[in-house]
Image (cartoon, rainbow, N blue to C red):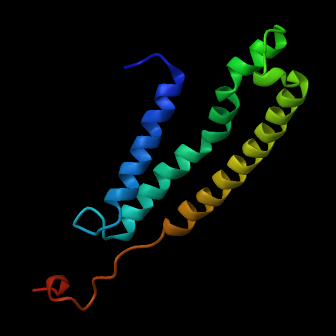
């Protein structure tokens, strides 16, 4: 496993892509509300960590800027570009927080849901 933090984000993105692909079709492992409960719970856990990941993803830029060693291609204004990054970062962290809250509400909503098998031949008492 790589110690490069960016590689872990790449792996996470690939896992989300795989989920998106495999969750398109139904099968024995993807038909009941409990399956959604587990998926949404895992998603809630994931998005709950996004804000921290967003912040920490810019750590190399922040430390380079603080050392006075940040350069902008084409002789751009370092302070302006860094301020642009910080503003976008703040927006992203706020959006991640809102997403985490919404997905947690989804998890809470799906929690009491179950498959109703009453009236099906397999569920009748002998």
| 78 displayed left or right of 89 | right
Residue in the image at 51% along x and 33% along y: 9
Is 100 drawn above or below residue 30 in the view shown? above
Residue 96 position within the rendered picture, expressed as x and y whole percent measured from the top left: 68, 47
Is 45 drawn above or below residue 118 in the view shown? above
Q: Residue furthest left?
A: 126
| 62 displayed left or right of 16 | right
| 68 displayed left or right of 19 | right
Residue in the image at 68% along x and 39% along y: 51
Residue 85 position within the rendered picture, expressed as x and y whole percent measured from the top left: 79, 33
Of residue 121 and residue 64, the one placed in the foreground of this image is 64
| 33 displayed left or right of 5 | left
Residue in the image at 30% along x and 70% along y: 31
Of residue 28 and residue 123, the one placed in the foreground of this image is 28
Residue 30 position within the rendered picture, expressed as x and y whole percent measured from the top left: 30, 65
Residue 37 position within the rendered picture, expressed as x and y whole percent measured from the top left: 44, 61
Residue in the image at 38% along x and 53% along y: 19
Of residue 124 and residue 10, the one placed in the foreground of this image is 10
Of residue 2 and residue 122, the one placed in the foreground of this image is 2
Q: Quadrant of residue 48?
A: top right
């Amino acid at each position: 496993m790589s110690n490069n933090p960016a590689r872990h984000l790449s792996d996470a993105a690939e896992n989300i892509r795989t989920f998106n692909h495999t969750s398109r079709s139904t099968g024995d492992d993807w038909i009941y509300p409990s399956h959604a409960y587990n998926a949404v719970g895992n998603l809630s856990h994931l998005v709950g960590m996004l804000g921290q990941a967003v912040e920490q993803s810019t750590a190399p830029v922040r430390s380079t800027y603080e050392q006075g060693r940040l350069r902008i291609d084409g002789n751009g204004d370092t302070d302006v570009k860094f301020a642009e990054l910080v503003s976008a970062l703040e927006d992203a962290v706020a959006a991640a927080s809102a997403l985490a809250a919404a997905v947690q509400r989804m998890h809470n909503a799906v929690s009491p849901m179950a498959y109703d098998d009453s009236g099906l031949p397999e569920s009748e008492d002998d």
